Image (spheres, rainbow, N blue to C red):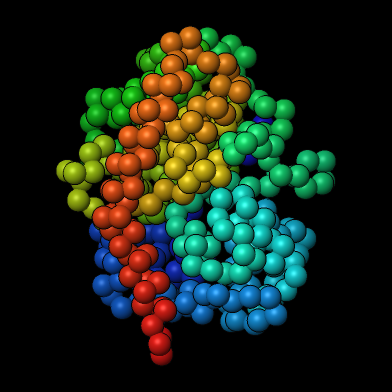
Amino acid sequence: MFPFFRYYLFFSLFFFASVFPATTSPDSMAANFDGGDGHNDFAWRNFARFLDAGKGSEVTGMSELKKYLNRFGYLPSSDTDFTDFFDDQFVSALILYQKRLGLPVTGNLDSDTISSIISPRCGMSDVVKINRSTAELHSTRRYAFFNGQPRWIRSSTLTYALSPDYTVDYLSSSEIRRVVRRSFSRWSAVIPVNFTESREYESSDIRIGFYRGEHGDGEAFDGVLGVLAHAFSPENGRLHLDAAERWAVDLEKEKSKVAVDLESVVTHEIGHVLGLAHSSVKEAVMYPSLSPRAKKVDLRIDDVEGAQALYGSNPNFKLKSFLESENSINTATRLRNFSSPFFIFLFSLFHLISMPNF
């Protein structure tokens, strides 16, 4: 069985542990996210200390950044007594991190790298261990899959089901089912695999449910904007969503500032269920990060090529039409991103920390 996939907020794990406790409600979390209580200013100033730090420098809290890179596989797990020195090993880890996530490769803690670190992301390690040696996930172009390329052997038709017991009460069953159906249809449009909803949860190939805390797979969920979801690679079929999140099926109607788009996460997790790991293409569905209130449901060519490398192409898939559609999506996404609250938040942050006497 291969590692499963989880979304984390780095700042909730390390710097913001006392600011954003995992048991807080979505509404109180939203207030903190906006910095309305004054605590965030202190936390962001902590991050500002790292901006443009380079080799040879010593910055208080650098050890926590090393723990972050260790958590995601970039620093050896045997080295757990981390210092605040920006040493050679940290430079190497940072360069690997920047390459893996498609960031400018500088070896420094520049604004792009810090922005990536503070963004919500999947908790899966970008490096896997095989027979006591460390090896990067096998990558072709910029999509990735696991060593051995695990896939569903009985792949012409897969059944899926929603747990009748583990759900959320503020979304109707029909709303959730529509979202899940659309998510599966995006993948079946590009590969020769059909997904059929089943009423038999236990016997279905893919089993989807909302869970809180410890739920039997050894990896407990931790509350609002901590771990969003995880899914096991082929042919396990489990796809779990954190019931503590404020899941949204319509971001125009859902006003919570920490709402998580259900369709975006389910579409991403289905990619893992099919055998895809993370892409280094920021626009791809399989890229690790997803901001609060962001929507990313349209497969990009990198997602398509990765899935088709495992399963082949849907006979009805037309590459030319897909690329034309992708170009239109790219234009619309750029316009939308420049007006998103998270982009404005990050822009304001880096404008603030670049001011003299900050």
Looking at the image, residue 350 sits to the left or right of residue 205; the answer is left
Looking at the image, residue 331 sits to the left or right of residue 51; the answer is left
Pinpoint residue 63: horizontal percent, then vertical percent: 63, 73
What residue is drawn where x is 65% and y is 34%?
Answer: 140
What residue is drawn where x is 38% and y is 16%?
Answer: 197
Pinpoint residue 254: horizontal percent, then vertical percent: 20, 46
Q: Is residue 54 above or below residue 6?
A: below
In this orientation, does residue 269 appear? yes
Outermost residue toward the bottom in this view: 357
In this orientation, does residue 230 appear? no
- Nearer to me, 199 or 128: 128
In which image quadrant can residue 28 be found?
bottom left
Q: Is residue 31 above or below residue 218?
A: below
What residue is drawn where x is 72% and y is 28%?
Answer: 148
In which image quadrant can residue 52 be found?
bottom right
What residue is drawn where x is 37% and y is 40%?
Answer: 330
- Nearer to me, 214 or 332: 332
- Nearer to me, 231 or 169: 231
Looking at the image, residue 257 sits to the left or right of residue 310; the answer is left
Quarter in which the C terminus is drawn: bottom left
